[in-house]
Image (cartoon, rainbow, N blue to C red):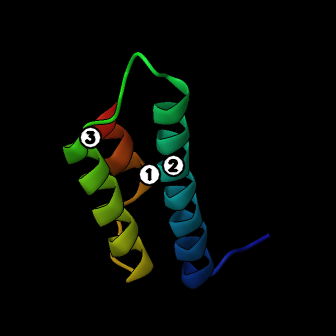
Amino acid sequence: MTLSKAEMKTIEKELDLMEIKVMRLKAKLAPEEKITEEELRELKAAEKRIAKGKWIGLDELTNEFG
C-alpha cells in the first residue's frame, strides 16, 4: 500500500493530536503531577498550530519531550 504525501501529513497530524490528548489524559490521571499553567498554555498553543496546519513531526515532539 502506497500513501501520498498528503495522506502521510494527515496521518502525522492525527498522531500529533493523539499525542496531545494522551499528554492531557496523563496530566489528569496523575494528580501528584499537576499540569502547570505554562504547560497548559503550551498544549493549547500546540492544538491551535495543528488546527492551522502548522505542526511538528512525532520524532521532533519525542525529542523535545522525551
Mark 2 or mark 3: which comes first in sequence?
2
Question: Is 20 drawn above or below residue 7 in the view shown?
Answer: above
Residue lying furthest right in this view?
Answer: 1
Mark 3: amino acid: Glu
Residue 26: x and y in percent read 52, 32
Mark 2, mark 1: which one is toward the viewer? Answer: 2
Q: Helix, strand, or loop for circle 3?
A: helix
Q: Quadrant of the C terminus?
A: top left
Residue 6 located left or right of residue 51: right
Callout 3–callout 1 Cβ contact below 8 Å: no
For label 1, count other residues whose C-alpha is less than 10 Å away and answer few (under 14), some (14-19) or many (20+).
Answer: some
Residue lying furthest top in this view?
Answer: 32
Residue 36, picture quadrant: top left
Residue 56 located left or right of residue 5: left
Residue 23 located left or right of residue 61: right
Q: Nearer the viewer, residue 48 or 61?
A: 48
Mark 3 or mark 1: which comes first in sequence?
1
Residue 5: x and y in percent read 54, 80
Q: Helix, strand, or loop for circle 2?
A: helix
Give residue 58's mark: 1
Mark 2: amino acid: Glu
Q: Quadrant of the N terminus?
A: bottom right
Q: Nearer the viewer, residue 58 or 33?
A: 33
Q: Nearer the viewer, residue 16 or 41?
A: 41
The residue at 51%/68% (across/down) is 13
Residue that badge 2 annotates: 19
Mark 1: amino acid: Leu
Residue 62 located left or right of residue 5: left
Residue that badge 3 annotates: 64
Question: Is 64 drawn above or below residue 9 in the view shown?
Answer: above
